[in-house]
Image: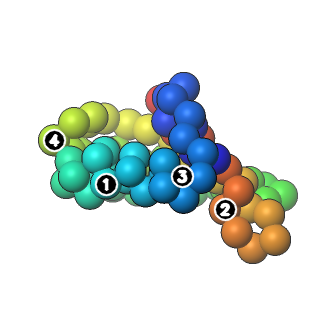
Amino acid sequence: MLDDWGRQFRGHEAIRGWSDRENIGAYATFDITGVQQDSGRYVVAATVGSDGFNGPSHFVFRVEDGLVSHMKITA
């Protein structure tokens, strides 16, 4: 599941469509400014640049059985 500032996307096709529009399609770049890890939870701080959103974001990943099970993007 992907939560992008409150917009939720579930399943491979929905997440792929989101990525095609808002990352690949918007020529997004990510300047990683920090990474923290705690008990299967990873927080990546980055400055995003694109044809859409530009600015700082936090990407919170939960990992279960070696796979990303959830990603939440916030300020």
Task: Judge by depth and name the residue closer to the eye, 67 or 54.
Answer: 67
Q: Secondary structure at mark 1?
A: helix
In this rendering, would 30 be left or right of 15? left
Q: CA distance from mark 4 to mark 2?
A: 26 Å
What residue is disc 1 on?
Answer: 20
Report how many numbered discs are placed on residues in the image.
4
Q: Position of residue 30 (x, y in %)?
A: 33, 55
| Residue 39, placed above or below residue 47 | below
Amino acid carrying label 2: it is Val
What residue is disc 3 on?
Answer: 44
Label 4 vs 2, first from the N-terminus: 4
Mark 1 neighbour class, 10 Å CA radius: few under 14, some 14 to 19, many 20 or more: few
Q: Position of residue 55 (x, y in %)?
A: 31, 35
Residue 38 position by quadrant:
bottom right
Q: Position of residue 17 (x, y in %)?
A: 38, 51
Residue depicted at 54% across the width and 52% down the height: 44
